[in-house]
Structure formats: C-alpha cells, structure tokens
Amino acid sequence: MDQIRADLGRAGYAIAAEVITPQKAKEMRNFLADEIARLEAIDVDNVRGFYTDNDDRNRRVSGAELVNRHPFFRDILEHELPLGITKEILGPQTHDESYLIHSYGANVTRPGSAQQGIHRDRGGNVPLSAGAAQTRFIWCLDDFVEENGATRVVPGSHLDTEPQSWSVQYESVAAEAPAGSVLIYTDLLLHGTGANVSSNLERAGVIIGYCPPWWKPMIQFPMTTDPAAMQDSSKTLRQLMGYSSVAIGFDEPWTFAPQAVKDLLVTPEMEW
C-alpha cells in the first residue's frame, strides 16, 4: 500500500500485481470471450466500441450484463483492494454512506485496433482543482503489453489543471502489467486504450469506477440486474450497487419498485 500511495501521488497511477491468480484471470478471460461471442451472435452492436474508440475492432461488454452472468463479476466489485483505496482517496461521506459503483464494463482490444483518444474519465464541467471524484480500476485478464494495446497513461497529468483536448497528441507510456494485476488511477489521469499492433494477441480488461453517493452512476443496477443474481449478495455489494432508498440522508421510498427489488434494499451506512 505504501508503494501504491507513492505511485499514485507521483505518477497518478499504480499497478498492484497478483491480485488474482493467473489461473483465475484465464478462467474469467475465457468466460468473457464466450460472452462476447454470445452477444455478437444476437447483434454485433451489443459489443461494439464507444465513441472514444477510433474503429469498431474493440469489443465492450456492459457491467450490467456482466453482473447477471457470473459471480466473479459481482465479487470483484467488493474486493478489499479497490474498496480500501476508494475509502482512502475519496474520504468520509455524509452520514458515512457507502460509495457507489459509477461505471463498469469490459474492454477487449483486438489485433489491428487503433489507439483510443487520450482522455479523463471525468465530466468537463467539474473543475480539476476539486480533486478526484472517482477511483478507477482496470482488472487485467490478459498480460497488458505495449504490443497488444496496454492502457496508455500520461504520468503526472493528475496534477495538471488544464482541461483535456482531443486535438492534443499527449506523450504517453504503456502501463504494462501481467494478467491478474490491477491498474489503479483516478478520474484526474489522462489515459486511453493503446493501439493493438500485434497480429494475434488480444487484451482484455475489466474496468470499474467508484464515486461518492451523491454522484449519479452511469449504471442503475437495481433497474438492470436480475434480482435472482443478488439473492445471496452481501450488504456491502448491495450498497455499492445502489440498493438503498437513501442518498445523503434523504429517504425516498421505492414505493413502486417490484417486490423482488424491494427485498434487496439495505441501509446506506457503510460498515466496511
């Protein structure tokens, strides 16, 4: 943790190795490949890249889809490493409410895909001087190397107060890491998916962001998650996924929510 803190402060990103075993990373990588094939067979638009991707070779799977499909994709949301770092960086919240999962998804970079535009995971109207509003984590399911499109980062850009520009060619480096590692940064860091210049290597990462309880998440999990998948879930996971009728002390009962969703509601006070 001391090394992670030092790297985050100096460069704006850190890499934690061996957070999961290479065997577990491979197992999840294979499951993700099967899931992409399943979704492509239904409609390829289910997995096409974002507007920030420069071509349609990347394959992306929504976290809303992932949490319904395999326990692992729920388990990593409440892993002690990202939760501990989030608590340390974002600090205490009103009434000690839990943080929320802001965004979640998987990105598979295929051979020949171009480099993504360098960007911040932050709305342009939020001043950079306000500090980090999100913690960000990329779980490496393959080895991340420059050749297969390892995430590129601009070291020190978390200290810059200049807004990002899509027209600027930022000097970046590849954040290389072995499978099973986690790349850690915040929404202040300039970064982007690297170009995959290999002939036969793919690069898969699972990307998760955490935010304060007053920040609107990109995914409304209670609206998109199969209640059956959450039956044995922990209070912590339900808090993180927004299964609470309370935000910064104001309760708005879920009067018209389906009973299966109501049954999953928990209090918002963080206990971890």
Image (tube, rainbow, N blue to C red):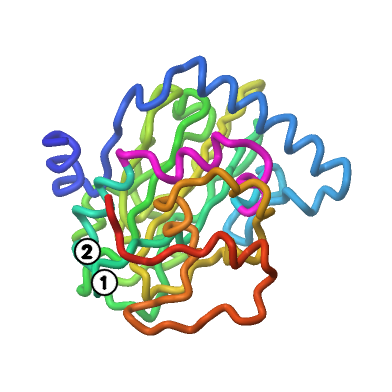
Query: Decide: marks 1, 2 in contact (CB < 8 A)?
Result: yes
Circle 1 — which element? Answer: helix
Where residue 262 appears, x then y in whole percent? 59, 67
Where residue 245 appears, x then y in whole percent? 47, 75
Residue holding disc 1: 128
User: Which residue appears at 24% of the width and 61% of the height?
Assistant: 90
Q: Is residue 11 left or right of residue 268?
A: left
Residue holding disc 2: 160
Q: Is residue 268 left or right of residue 224?
A: left
For residue 143, above or below residue 123:
above
Which segment is the magenta one?
64-81
Q: Is residue 96 magenta?
A: no
Q: Classify mark 1: residues with Cα within 10 Å, few (<14), some (14-19) or many (20+).
A: some
User: Which residue appears at 24% of the width and 58% of the height?
Assistant: 158
Q: Amino acid at mark 2?
A: Asp
Q: Amino acid at mark 1?
A: Leu
